[in-house]
Image (cartoon, helix red, strand yellow):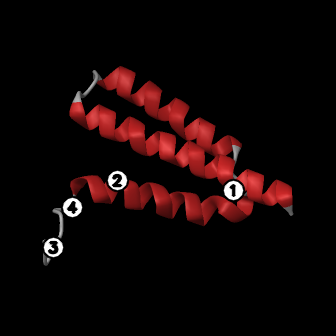
Amino acid sequence: MNSERDHREQLERALDGLDHAVAAWLADPPERRVLEREFEIAVARILVHTGALDYDYVVGRIRHSILSLFEPRSPTLH
């Protein structure tokens, strides 16, 4: 059971790394070939930690991360 928790933590770190990479790319976009290669490497790191049961979660997490970068921010009621 501990290895399952370790597996999930490693997966979360890899997904967080992809989030940070995408934010950096948006802040200072690299040329297309560099972006494609960096994205390929980042996704490969995630897949190393992904079992068949994690596939839907990983796809959902990546989709959410990308959409959150492009969707307008919701206004706050502060």
Which of the two marks, 1 or 3, is nearer to us in this view?
3
**Residue matched to label 2:** 66
Q: Residue at x 49, y 64 (%)?
A: 60
* Label 3 packing within 10 angstroms: few (<14), some (14-19), many (20+): few
Q: Secondary structure at mark 3?
A: loop
**Real-space Cα separation, disc 1 to disc 3, in angstroms:** 32 Å
Q: Secondary structure at mark 1?
A: helix
| Three-letter amino acid code at the position of disc 4 | Glu
**Residue matched to label 1:** 8
Which of the two marks, 2 or 3, is nearer to us in this view?
3
**Residue matched to label 4:** 71
Which of the two marks, 4 or 3, is nearer to us in this view?
3
| Three-letter amino acid code at the position of disc 2 | Ile
**Residue matched to label 3:** 76
Q: Secondary structure at mark 2?
A: helix
**Real-space Cα separation, disc 2 to disc 3, in angstroms:** 21 Å
Q: Earlier in the sequence, mark 1 or mark 3?
A: 1
**Real-space Cα separation, disc 1 to disc 2, in angstroms:** 21 Å
Q: Earlier in the sequence, mark 4 or mark 3?
A: 4
Q: Residue at x 28, y 21 (%)?
A: 31
* Label 1 packing within 10 angstroms: few (<14), some (14-19), many (20+): some
Which of the two marks, 1 or 2, is nearer to us in this view?
1
| Three-letter amino acid code at the position of disc 1 | Arg
Q: Earlier in the sequence, mark 1 or mark 4?
A: 1
In the figure, 24 relative to 63: above or below?
above
**Real-space Cα separation, disc 2 to disc 4, in angstroms:** 9 Å
